[in-house]
Amino acid sequence: MPHRRWNPLLREWVLVSPHRTQRPWLGQVASAAVTPQIEYDPACYLCPGNCRAGGFRNPAYTSTFVFDNDYAALLPDARHLEIDQGGLIVARGERGICRVVCFSPRHDLTIPRMKPEELRQVIDVWTDQYRELGALPWVRHVQIFENRGALMGASNPHPHCQIWANEELPNQPARELAAQREHQQAHGQCLLCKYLSMELESRERIVCENAGFVALVPYWAVWPFETMILSRRHTPSLPGLSDAERDDLAAILRGLTIRYDNLFTTSFPYSMGFHQQPTDGEPHPEWHFHAHYFPPLLRSATVQKFMVGYELLATPQRDITAETAAGHLRELSEVHYLDRT
Ligand SMILES: [Zn+2]
Ligand SMILES: [Zn+2]
Ligand SMILES: [Zn+2]
């Protein structure tokens, strides 16, 4: 039966219409993502030793490589700006720093294809970056995110992510902060600790898990194969993770993304990112470290979901239920399809 589900983090509804999965598909068919097959591409501006825009040359880096984005959306020295015309025409200046993190020198090495120890190195770099940028007195939020695949608008296939650090809390983290804080105040308990305990009891939407983390399809998921990764222990950010938990995080990122690639035997596109406590110098006992994955694929490597029509004008809607999606992902192997003999 069609029904609405509540997203307690963003405090909005999603419409679920399971009966619609039967409808014939006459929509756009995208071309399947192709994993780069070469370890080094002389034309790639992220490969070691190559030239980037503006005449910068990458060093001959041998592990994870971080640099300031040549086309940064935010600038650290943006001028002060304040516009307020009757509360309707309103603008503020916004300072920020945008960085790019190449996961490895290899042009073809996506996260699901990395060794656990290589991925652990990336997690250590993310942790250092979060700490370093968050320590700047004016930086209140650090967003680490990866856009994977041309379908998600990634401009370069070389596996990399971005880090945007800025002055004010962005929209989604601000909504999640308010929801987590109010839940903590009203119930004396963390929203995501409570939610995770309910999911671990029902087990209907769990995809995979290890000692430190659980990957699940949230009850309120909008995208067909949307997932969240939650730390089992209540901790607000990457620096709060123990050495063993960082290894567990590498293992679950790998396990989940291998399942994603195996789902439609393709290099699975997605946007993912971590939600960590604001770096505003305030204590944040309400904040629970987690990651979101928003993949666009719907029913094959070439059929994607579009957020259009009713979803843009009214409420997001999904066809397959979170439980069905979790079941599909759970049944998949954690051996990557390219590693099968
Ligand atoms: Zn490259
Ligand atoms: Zn918690
Ligand atoms: Zn979140």
Image: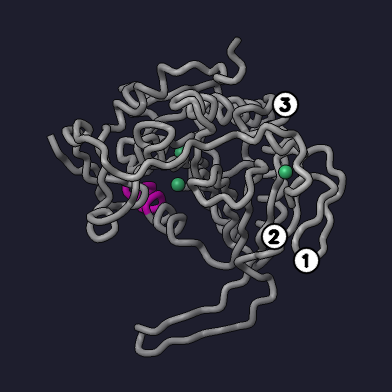
Give the distance between the C-alpha atoms of the residues marked 3 and 2, in whole angstroms: 26 Å
The residue under the point 36% across, 53% down is 182
Tell which tag, 3 or 2, sits nearer the viewer: 2
Residues at badges 3 and 2 in contact (C-beta under 8 Å)?
no
Give the distance between the C-alpha atoms of the residues marked 3 and 1, in whole angstroms: 34 Å
Q: Of helix, strand and loop, which one carries label 1? A: helix
313 shown above or below 296: below
- Residue 306 vs residue 145: left or right? left
Residue 127: percent from left, percent from top: 68, 44
Asked where in the image residue 338 lies, by quadrant, the reply is: top right
Mark with earlier residue (1, 2): 1
Circle number at residue 54: 1
Residue found farthest to the left: 1
- Residue 35 vs residue 259: left or right? right
Mark with earlier residue (3, 1): 1
Circle number at residue 3: none
Asked where in the image residue 64 lies, by quadrant, the reply is: top right
Mark 3, residues whose alpha carbon is within 10 Å: few (<14), some, or many (≥20)? few
Which region is colored magenta? 179-186
Residue found farthest to the bottom: 85
- As for residue 335 lying within the magenta part, the answer is no
Circle number at residue 69: 2
Q: Of helix, strand and loop, which one carries label 3? A: helix
Q: What's the residue type where badge 1 is placed?
A: Gly
The residue indicated by pointer 3 is 117
Depth check: 264 or 255 in front?
Answer: 264
